[in-house]
Image (cartoon, grey):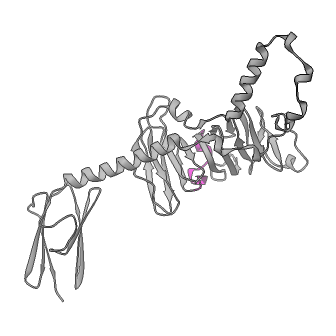
Amino acid sequence: MSFKTTKVQAQVADIGDISELNGKAQILRDKPYDANLKFAIQSNDEAITKDGRMAITFLDDSIVKLTEHSQLLIDEYIYDPDPSKAKMALTFGLGTARFITGNLNRIDKQNITLKTPTANIAIRGTDFTATVDELGRSLIILLPDALGLSSGEIEVVTAMGTVLLSKPYEATTVSVFESAPTKPVILDLTLDVIDNMLIVTPPKEEVLVEEERTSTKADSVLDFNDLDIDYLAEDYLKEDSLEFTELDINYLDVNYLEDLLNVLDALAVAEEEDQLAQATSTQISGTLLGRDPDTQITTLITGNLISLRREVNESVRIDLNGSDSYTVIFIQDGISNVIKVNGGGSSVITITQSD
């Protein structure tokens, strides 16, 4: 259907249009509108795909591509010749969206706000995907440029931390906004795989209907008997010709996490293996990893950081670079504990504790 503006809508500036469309989709504004090519997009529009895919091109040539069963809210978009006055704010609510930046010099990067239910994304001229499941968990993947090189950098920010993605196919996940993003890892993926991360499973009922239609075509015209048809048994309210509304989206038909959970598991395993490798590559003698009941020293290894803590009457903590060698001596009441890191070395640190 062609897009028709009302008197109120005519006062609102168009900020882009639908540049690609395959299948069924909607734009929610003052009411639902069936999506079609060149459909004008405005601020506060919500784009929803059902069994189709959609691409929206904005005035600064930025492009957002949505796969099936996805939701995108355009919170705000202001296009101005002065980049400091231009703004873009988008929320990836559900499904998978690919964001391809346009002429970012037309919008100051600090004025671009991209977010999911569990993370904020700061961009520096880049191409990335964001996948959000029905629980709000987010998977962010930095994509390469046309030459296969890094397309830029993005920061994934939560209330508990920030990670930087700067390499092709580098990814992080966020479960809730109150947790830190996972440590970035590089996924063994291709653009084609990412483009098909959502696996849409057609309802079995539709498959059966299609089989019945096929068998009907095979019958001879002479076999047709009008009396054999029970017209009352057919529910014509189920026809796709009725208006498509948000209620038509059946999220049970979409297996969002068949791929996403595999990625989440891979990220978690990779992080554990990396931490274990770092811990085992650092040699510590004189005390145990974790809490040692004899020396009363707690030893923690986080990445390349070694933390030694002792809390007896007085508390002391020392952080060391795991790639260097040290000899650390804890002395209290005439009793000393000698801790050697990576075999010890010329760097000797003596800590005396007293009441």
- Please tell me which residue is depicted at 79% across the width and 46% down the height of the picture: 13
Which residues make up the magenta segment?
Answer: 102-117
Residue 142 vertical position relative to residue 295 in the rendered view, above or below: above
- Please tell me which residue is depicted at 49% across the width and 54% down the height of the picture: 174
Membership of 69 in magenta stretch: no
Q: Nearer the viewer, residue 173 or 108?
A: 173
As drawn, is 345 to the left or to the right of 17?
Answer: left
Q: Nearer the viewer, residue 120 or 295?
A: 295
Residue 225 vertical position relative to residue 276 in the rendered view, above or below: above
As drawn, is 330 to the left or to the right of 5?
Answer: left
- Quadrant showing the N terminus: top right
Q: Nearer the viewer, residue 61 or 277?
A: 277
The answer to whether any part of residue 52 appears in the image is: no
Looking at this view, name the residue that lies furthest to the front: 228
As drawn, is 111 to the left or to the right of 227?
Answer: left
Number of numbered discs on residues = 0
Q: Nearer the viewer, residue 207 or 13?
A: 207
Residue 134: % across, % down:
60, 51
Residue 340: % across, % down:
12, 63
The answer to whether any part of residue 192 appears in the image is: yes
Residue 93: % across, % down:
63, 50
- Please tell me which residue is depicted at 58% across the width and 48% down the height of the picture: 133
Residue 136: % across, % down:
58, 53
